[in-house]
Amino acid sequence: MRVTIKDIAKEANVSVTTVSRVLNNKPDVGDDTRAKILKIIDEMNYNPNSVARGLVMQKTHTIGLIIPDISNPFFPQIVRAVEDKAQKLGYSVILFNTDNHLERERKAVELFKSKQLDGLIVSLSLGNEKILKDLKAENYPVVQIDRSVLDHHYPLISIDNKKSAYQMVQYMIKKGYKKIAHISGDLNTTTARDRLEGYKKALKKYGIPIKNKYIIEGEYTQNSAYQAMQSLLNLKNRPKAIFAANDLSAAGVYKALFEADLKIPEDMAVAGHDDINLASLLKPELTTMRQPKYEMGERAVTILLKMINQQNFEIKDQILTTDLIIRESV
Amino acid sequence: MRVTIKDIAKEANVSVTTVSRVLNNKPDVGDDTRAKILKIIDEMNYNPNSVARGLVMQKTHTIGLIIPDISNPFFPQIVRAVEDKAQKLGYSVILFNTDNHLERERKAVELFKSKQLDGLIVSLSLGNEKILKDLKAENYPVVQIDRSVLDHHYPLISIDNKKSAYQMVQYMIKKGYKKIAHISGDLNTTTARDRLEGYKKALKKYGIPIKNKYIIEGEYTQNSAYQAMQSLLNLKNRPKAIFAANDLSAAGVYKALFEADLKIPEDMAVAGHDDINLASLLKPELTTMRQPKYEMGERAVTILLKMINQQNFEIKDQILTTDLIIRESV
DNA sequence: CTGAAAGCGCTAACAT
DNA sequence: ATGTTAGCGCTTTCAG
């Protein structure tokens, strides 16, 4: 049996109340008493039970992080930032991967509510707006990261995906490309939709007709993009450049291109998005838009903790800026 | 205020005990009563408080995962596997990054004990054997993953690093390389030590003298390996091949080589270890040893849960096999 | 400065 | 089949 506050109290000949006081650094305890208790705590190697504490305080000092997939290289940095910041502020984080599966997203939220987590950082798919609506009704602290759902109940920490895509495509156009195709991300996400829009907007702006054949829906994965690229290569009228919705997709595009013995960017230019570590390691190095992933994670917990600690915190999105990282592939 | 078991009891005109019974699917409850309670639970959207439950049951259904760094691409797959398996079995996982920092490792364990986590999956640095010894004294369920500490109190889920490195170096030798250098990982880890040993063993076995100048300690990072490679290139008597302790290091080696305008493998062969996703994306594609990362994660939770659910579970390490993945860089 | 008592939300003997 | 009671380990009034 682990040692409890009672054991300490008994050993020190004081009440549990007094022990609790020193545990929580309350003022009204005699110096000698405090010293004695501290000593005993140390000797007996006492470690307060946070579950019990959580029950009375109605606070677990734990937050939930719901993301599609930690093994997608976009997320580890975000998760790292969230955990770092949380750790620094005395919070723990429970991770949950959903694979964008609506049912698992729901399950995650149920579970986390049941565990009385103090707040949630979520990256949900479209179609689950009700989850957030219900959470909001209970006034549960939540912040959305990366992608948003349509309704707007909670602050979103992200980038301006439309603008970011626009900038990239604009860059490609200025480089002289006209036949630019787009391999999108999973269109069940706002990010993919916005990037697609940005792509279209840039073409329009520069008077380039939008061809449906040049737009293929992928899933933000290497493999889906690989296949998308295959079909693009089969077109009679091939594009000369590809804007892949994320770097992982760009890697898939690279694969397909190498197999077809095509040179990047001479035969086909390729641009990505996100600037994950991989981007600078590809050959040729990938031109992409850098997303401040670490900062997004940090900000998410900063805001979440504000919501947790002061009710009625005003909802304000934080839209960070992206940077065009020019390398060799465009 | 959230709805509690009391509210349900009151609404249903029964005692909380009865509600608790239906919550836990106990048999002795009348069918009608059960139905009524279930209905009310649903109507009131009741969600049992696991903190309270955890306090009485002495079980939190949560495990702790202590690793160096989730943003090191070796770990996400392991973490994914751990979370998947845990999720499947009704457990949650709290993540903690330590950067191999002894003090933070200690802090993580303290925190997790305080949170009454049911068990721990850890990847600790050398120098923290005491942590595990103390944990063992309390009979706390723990399994080590990837790397071990020297004392052997808890089961380890890993690979045979020495053998794996030996195989790789042997392959390089058989390919005709004699001047093979090694850029090690952080030698405060058993994995780095074992890989170094395996490297030496292979050289010995094939009668190739071990040159200290050909062994440089890195940190398993891209940057440390990049620098190590620079110094290797400055040697009067340059090696002709590099065995990098992990793929991330190999990527650093690639960078240094490209900068020096050297061709892989013609001018310098490069081998990695782990087979992270990146390996097949590098150009030339990286020859490496594949580690069953996902399986390691799964097994770790399987064993941990056995320890949790049946005291005195016999300690048995699980050493999985690695595979030589021949690609283009050697 | 210290202690007694109540209670957080739940489960588990032990009745009945 | 259902209720009463105690208690998990802690914090927090409220007294003194």
Image (cartoon, coloured by chain):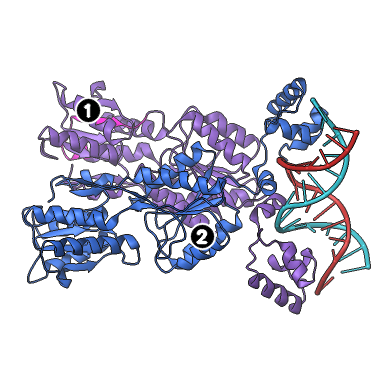
Chain colours: A purple, B blue, C red, D cyan
Q: Which residue is mark 1?
A: A208
Which amino acid lies under the numbered mark 1 shown in the image of this protein?
Answer: Ile
Q: Residue at x 51, y 50 (%)?
A: B313
Q: Which residue is mark 2?
A: B108
Whether A180 is drawn above or below C4: the answer is above
Q: Nearer the viewer, mark 2 or mark 1?
A: 2
Is residue A174 covered in magenta? yes
Q: Is residue A326 visible?
A: no
Q: In x, y percent, where is residue A177?
A: 17, 35
Q: Nearer the viewer, residue B51 or B195?
A: B195
Is residue B305 covered in magenta? no
Secondary structure beneath label 2: helix
Q: Is residue C12 left or right of residue B193?
A: right
Q: Chain of mark 2?
A: B
Q: Residue at x 74, y 26 (%)?
A: B37
Q: Residue at x 13, y 58 (%)?
A: B257
Query: Circle 2: is it few (<14), some (14-19), or many (20+) Cα within 10 Å?
Result: many
Q: Which residues are magenta?
A: A172-186
Secondary structure beneath label 1: loop
Q: In x, y percent, where is residue B262?
A: 8, 57
Q: In x, y percent, where is residue B296?
A: 38, 46
Which amino acid lies under the numbered mark 2 shown in the image of this protein?
Answer: Ala
Q: In x, y percent, where is residue A133?
A: 59, 32
Q: Is residue A145 left or right of residue B165?
A: right
Q: Residue at x 26, y 31 (%)?
A: A182
Whether B249 is drawn above or below A104: the answer is below
Q: Nearer the viewer, residue A85 or B89?
A: B89
Q: Chain of mark 1?
A: A
Q: Is residue B130 visible?
A: yes
Q: Is residue B73 left or right of residue B11?
A: left
Q: CA distance from mark 2 to mark 1?
A: 56 Å
Whether B80 is drawn above or below B268: the answer is above
